[in-house]
Amino acid sequence: MLPKMSVSRRCTAILANVQNYRMLMSDELSEELVTLAHDLREVRICHLNSTAFGGGVAELLSRYLPMLQALGIHADWRLIHGQTEFFTVTKAFHNALQGGHYALGDKEQGLYLDVNEGSAKALGNDYDVYIVHDPQPAALRHFAGTRDAKWIWRCHIDSSSPDEQVSGFLRPYLEEYDAVVFTMPEFLLPGLRTHRAAFIAPAIDPLATKNMALSQDLCRRAVADSGVDPSKPLLVQVSRFDPWKDPLGVIQAYRLVKKEIPDVQLALIGAMAGDDPEGWELLDRVEEEAAGDPNMFVFTNLAGVGSMEVNVFQRGCDVVIQKSLREGFGLVVSEAFWKEKPVVAGHAGGIPMQCPEGFEANLVHTVEACAERIVHLLARPGERGAFGRAGREHVRKNFLLPRLVRDELRLIKQLVC
């Protein structure tokens, strides 16, 4: 069997916080969740992806699965097998689906299909619904053969303008699914003939360690312990070290801001994912850029920076940056808004849907525009506060975990009932 991630201990915490969740959602949403859970109580669900840490999918599933189980739904999370060579290919798939070019050869196709076939054989036949995340395990449905189950492919990236060679290779495998899910209609893979398409935005867990309430004094002390000066302006970007997140562009924007505000500081915080070998190369380049600048900091999970530290830095900074060039959603944007922090972000993918009305000027296309908005916000604490409060309310209404659970359970019910 494929490895299963253990989330059962987290269920106890989720159950203990049910009342706190109810305080954050409407009575209608709460009642619908209870009804859906009752209707699906006999349905066995399996989520499949390629890594247990370091990426947005893993972060989502680590909070999503306990909530399903706490609602009384049988749900597991399993990981496919794969070596470094496989993940090098699938990272290229990821980039190609977002618009990059990839010369996909017979060797790469064979490696991809061999890993998916082997994982399908190890999957077992214990579930009624399989939800497969992103391109790494997308061919599982094909190799799983005939089963009395429903299959959903969940795409978390912007595949609106993909490389035709890679999308043409993947498209026949995706068309075997009973349903496909994208963040928004614009992301639907061109030319995909599907039985059912749903559009469901991701969400954050407001009660997770990364998002729980912390005092400002605690955040300032913790930031200071890391070597950052809490008396100086601090900019933070939290993301994987991925070219699409443009950390090198963030550094360029920071240097432009320094010309106006010399004592400004920048912290780049990222988790290294097991299915992203490209990230190590970019991390090296970022660390080279940071070398010799006492106001620039690079932190990763390799040095013990986890969810609590991310929370501390997001709450302790003055402006959050998410300068993505392409973006499926960008959970860190909602995380920052939940903490009432202003965000300067790339006008890309699912980021604009997270921006509260009236603050769209902070969605940028260039390094220069990013720097200009940062300087503007740093000079206007009142506007920063209004922006952050509007962002939190927008996230509360649209991008919290109970809404995501509701939307996906609705889709599952449509397929199995």
Image (cartoon, rainbow, N blue to C red):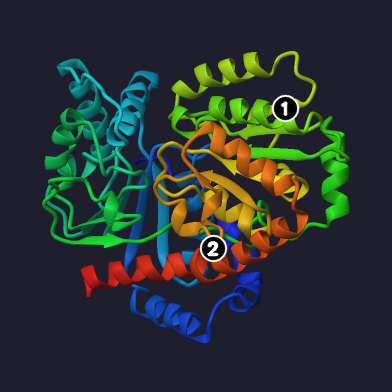
Q: Kindly indicate the quadrant of the structure image that contains residue 389.
A: bottom right
Tell me which label, 2 or 1, sits earlier in the chain. Answer: 1
Q: Amino acid at mark 1?
A: Lys
Do we see residue 263 in this rendering?
A: yes
Q: Position of residue 204 (x, y in %)?
A: 54, 58
- Residue at image position (54%, 32%) is 367
Instruction: Please rate how many residues cluster around mark 2, counting C-alpha atoms within 10 Å: few if below 14, some from 14 to 19, many from 20.
Output: some
Between the residue at mark 2 and the residue at mark 1, the CA separation in whole angstroms equals 29 Å
Q: Kindly indicate the quadrant of the structure image that contains residue 244.
A: top left
Q: Position of residue 185 (x, y in %)?
A: 27, 57
Do we see residue 239 in this rendering?
A: no
- Residue at image position (65%, 53%) is 342
Q: State the residue position of label 1.
A: 259
Rendered view: 7 above or below 20: above
Rendered view: 83 above or below 156: above
Left or right, 288 with respect to 163, comes to: right
Q: Are marks 2 and 1 in contact (CB under 8 Å)?
A: no
Label 2: element kind: loop
Q: Amino acid at mark 2?
A: Pro
Left or right, 197 with respect to 351, comes to: left
Q: Position of residue 50 (x, y in %)?
A: 39, 37
18 and 323: which is toward the camera:
323
Residue 341 - label: none
357 and 71: which is toward the camera:
357
Rendered view: 255 above or below 237: above
Left or right, 133 with respect to 24, comes to: left
Q: State the residue position of label 2.
A: 356
Q: Position of residue 141 (x, y in %)?
A: 20, 45
- Residue at image position (30%, 28%) is 100
